Amino acid sequence: QARGNVEETSWSGNRHDPMRIQSAWRDKFPKTDLTGGYIGDGYPLCIDLPDKMFLRKGARYRLLGSSSSPELMEDHSYFKKDPNIKRFVLDSNSGLKARLCNASNGECQYEMSVTLDTNIDCVGKECIADTVRVVDVGGIYYEYARPPCVEQAFYNNAMKVIYRERWADSSCANPLLPYASEACCSVANLRAQRYPNYLYDQERVLFSTANSRCEEIGMTSCDFNDIGGIETHQKGYHWSTDHCRILLKVNSVGQVAIVYEPEDYAYLHPHIRDDNRNFFKVYWRGDYPKNDNDVTTGNNCGGGICEALVTGGCLCDTVISETLVFSRMPENKEEVLANLNIGAYDPSAFDEGTYTEQEANGVKAYFTSFGIFDRDTVFEVTDEFGRIQRFKNTKENVRIKGAPEYSFRNAPSFMSLLNTEASVRDAEYETEAALDHYLHHDNTAPFVAIRLIQRFTTSNPSPRYVKEVATAFRNGKYGQFGTGAYGDLAATIAAVLLEPEARSVTLDADPFRGGLREPILRVMAVLRSMEVEKSEGYPVLRLEGMSDKIGQMAHSFPTVFSFFLPEYRPDGRPGEATLVGPETMIMDMPKMVGMLNGLFS
């Protein structure tokens, strides 16, 4: 028999996980946060991760078992049926293989998830791989999950990549990231081929690696027509020698959309064409180009520097500038947190000797040249929530080419704009970053405090009561309860139940203190007091039609906002006194009569 929440899919799919991520549906563009920044601020740039990150401290591997199909990245479905699939087989003397095997008494003890706690020296073909997807550990497969990192929405020196063949999808890609495969051509022949000794199917390499591989076989990278010698499902994005312009389109309120313009192409995906409407918010430093036809007072699209579009908005070319932030040691950690946005990866994951360390004013500085503050300097601080934060000593600005007075901070994003690169991995990282941002927002602690107090003790807590519970949530400690970690619920619940306002006998005499018991809890309390037991032959006690009779049934809330709103004010004197009574929202006269009939009949 199918389990209702997991296996029964006849009408509603998987009800067990209603928040399952569909990465193909994910908005690929930068997303603003709640504090004037972006989801992704504080995360390292993917281009700044150490070389061969898959062998570095912090690299994570997920057990796939006997299947070689990745789960966090996308592979063509034909690979599951391809008997000649080429996977990355680790050498017998590989340190990575030894760590993933985790042998005991000569037998591998595979772990579900493995995170490298030290750097591992490369062996064999690991030394020539830019990255890996799935690794073969003696017939058992692990998927490599690159650490969370972000890409800037705009960047310099973009190169064109082509998906499979010229008349298919073209796009722009950062040549400093392993996002495509090589395409090698001989003289006057635009039917390209892959490097014959490529390491695995769907391998992605840097643009420089692609060029080197082509030169090794006496060929050159090219703006090819198609790829020969491999099956269609083995093709993906391949580097070409054409360059790309990354433009921006500005609408009437200053939001921008990204427009890709390769030198030559047959097809661009709609989300990056010049007619796309995928606008997102940016933080302009002052004014921005305005189409005179869009607003009352325009500026002719930046004095004619940008193209005025007949459909509205301005189309502008861009230049990326990078600025040093600190040329001295910051005075305190607050100065670091206020002025830096681009994260940095753990310096201990780089080769020994890459960084030297200095500490002052509660700030650690890591230098590539000791004592010299440059753009590669990394600052490390511990924030008010106890999190270690690392930042790169630089800011990136996007400027309008020809009109540098129009500029904004470059926006980070977890998701790649390459059409087939929307992976579950990056979508999950973005979701986790958003949740982490919400969790550590200044309003979260008092919000959680009020909601828990309303459910456990009183509907209308005093500000002092809320403050004490919120403080316990933030500090992770209340008396002897809690671990001291931010958001510790043991400390939070202890504060809710043990605060004087929750236990005061004097306050019990106040008719406006406390809260109404939810209808279903009233019924359960009566059943428990009567010591009701299930009838013989019936495995469970069934309560039928409770939503209609009393307005509430466990797990049957009518909306995502549950049965009632926490800020609901009832009619009469409590409401006139601005007091809330959430449970009264579902207590109309028919429901009250239904409750009485059920309890006393």
Image: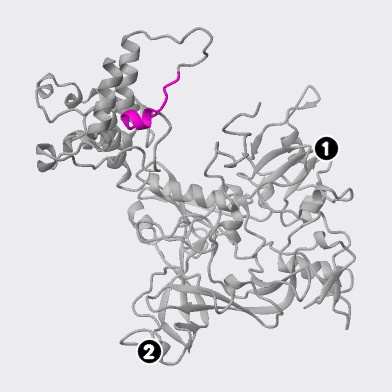
Q: Which mark is residue 292?
A: 2
Viewer-proximal residue among 478 and 462? 462
Residue 485 drawn in magenta: no
Colouring:
one colour
* Depicted 484 relative to depicted 329: above or below: above
Residue 253, how many percent across, how many down?
Answer: 37, 75
Percent across and percent down for residue 244 are 64, 78
Q: Nearer the viewer, residue 278 or 262?
A: 278
- Which comes sooner in the sequence, label 2 or label 1? 1
Question: Of the residues shown, which amino acid type is indicated by label 2?
Answer: Asp
Quadrant where the image shows the C terminus: top left
Above or below, comparing residue 212 to residue 124 in the picture: below
Percent x, y for residue 191?
Answer: 86, 75
- For label 1, the residue is 139
**Part of the protein shown in magenta:** 542-553
430 sits left or right of 224 in the view: left
- Mark 2 is surrounded, within 10 Å at the Cα level, by few (under 14), some (14 to 19) or many (20 or more) other residues, namely some
List x then y, in percent, for residue 580: 19, 39
